[in-house]
Image (tube, helix red, strand yellow):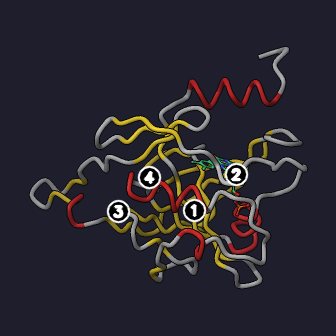
């Protein structure tokens, strides 16, 4: 990757490591403000114990995104899934809200209390993972540097239609995934469409 600027490297990685499902992350600030933001740098890591990661990278002025600060301060977060009908509300929360303002109202989504952690869950999501912070791994400095948030899943909530009681297994969730740039893929229909980020 020598010779590529951070912007070029970002575009190359996010267009080629795709489609990526979206972690819709709910956190609580030390000021009591509930935060909600989407992250497609997101993956399961292992199952013993159940573990996942997402990366709220360093922002354009070299600072922490609110979600990362909240996770570090509180040690807790909830990963909610996103399906096609949630696309516009999810996208609305990706605008740069100041820390004292909550994205929940702009999203139109409803909160449900979590069981083991304090940040609320997104009622509309088909799957919600309550997580406790295991570790933040910092890789690099400056805008777009990775901040890997590794969480242990302490409780999972699943929509009834996703549970196969006979096989005691979850059915594939058919979620919305991010491709490169403004492009998305709906896994339920294989539809591809574009959504511009809010200013
Ligand atoms: C679909 C989608 C996926 C995104 N994925 C990421 C990501 O993986 N990492 C990241 O730092 N920002 C990502 N963003 C941008 C953040 O959502 C945005 O910076 C947001 O304002 C962060 O909110 P916060 O400051 O409240 O944490 C994504 C935005 C969208 C719309």
* Label pair 4/2, CB-CB below 8 angstroms: no
Horizontal side, residue 57 vs residue 193: left or right: right
Whole-number angstrom distance, CA of label 4 to CA of label 2: 24 Å
Beta carbon of the mark 2 residue lies under 8 A of ligand 1: yes
For label 2, the residue is: 56
Q: In the shown orientation, is residue 15 left or right of residue 84?
A: right
Q: Which residue is depicted at the point 25% across and 54% down?
A: 170
Instruction: Give the x, y percent position of residue 133.
Output: 63, 63
The earlier-in-sequence mark between 3 and 4 is: 4
Quadrant housing the N terminus = top right
Mark 2, Cα crowd under 10 Å, few <14 / some 14-19 / many 20+, is: many
Q: CA distance from mark 2 to mark 3?
A: 23 Å
Q: Secondary structure at mark 3?
A: loop
Structural distance between the alpha carbons of marks 1 and 3: 14 Å
**First along the sequence among labels 1 and 3:** 1
- Classify 10 Å Cα crowding around label 1: few (below 14), some (14-19), many (20 and above): many
Q: Earlier in the sequence, mark 4 or mark 1?
A: 1
Residue identifier under label 4 = 48
Could you tell me if the residues under marks 2 and 3 are in contact, i.e. CB atoms within 8 Å?
Answer: no
Residue 116: where, in percent of width, then height?
49, 79
Q: Nearer the viewer, residue 29 or 176?
A: 176
Q: Is residue 103 above or below residue 146?
A: below
Q: Which residue is mark 3?
A: 126
Towards the viewer: 116 or 197? 197
- The residue under label 1 is 25
Q: Can you give x and y, in whole percent of width and height, for residue 80 in the image?
A: 47, 62
Q: Is mark 1 within 8 Å of ligand 1?
A: yes
């Amino acid at each position: 990757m020598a010779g590529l600027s951070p912007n070029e490297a970002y575009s190359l990685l996010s267009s080629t490591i795709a489609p990526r499902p979206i972690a819709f992350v709910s956190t609580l600030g030390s000021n009591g403000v509930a935060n909600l933001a989407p992250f497609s740098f997101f993956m399961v890591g292992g199952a013993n114990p159940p573990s996942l990661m997402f990366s709220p990278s360093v922002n354009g002025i070299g600072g922490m995104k609110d979600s990362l600060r909240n996770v570090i301060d509180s040690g807790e977060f909830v990963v909610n899934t996103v399906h096609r009908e949630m696309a516009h509300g999810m996208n609305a929360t990706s605008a740069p809200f100041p820390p004292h303002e909550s994205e929940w109202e702009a999203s139109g989504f409803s909160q449900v209390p979590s069981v083991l952690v304090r940040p609320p869950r997104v009622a509309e999501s088909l799957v919600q993972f309550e997580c406790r912070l295991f570790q933040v791994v910092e890789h690099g400095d400056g805008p777009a540097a990775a901040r890997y948030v590794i969480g242990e899943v302490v409780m999972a909530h699943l929509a009834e239609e996703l549970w196969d009681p006979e096989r005691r297994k979850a059915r594939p969730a058919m979620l919305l995934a991010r491709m490169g740039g403004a492009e998305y893929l709906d896994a339920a229909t294989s539809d591809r469409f574009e959504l511009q980020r809010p200013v």
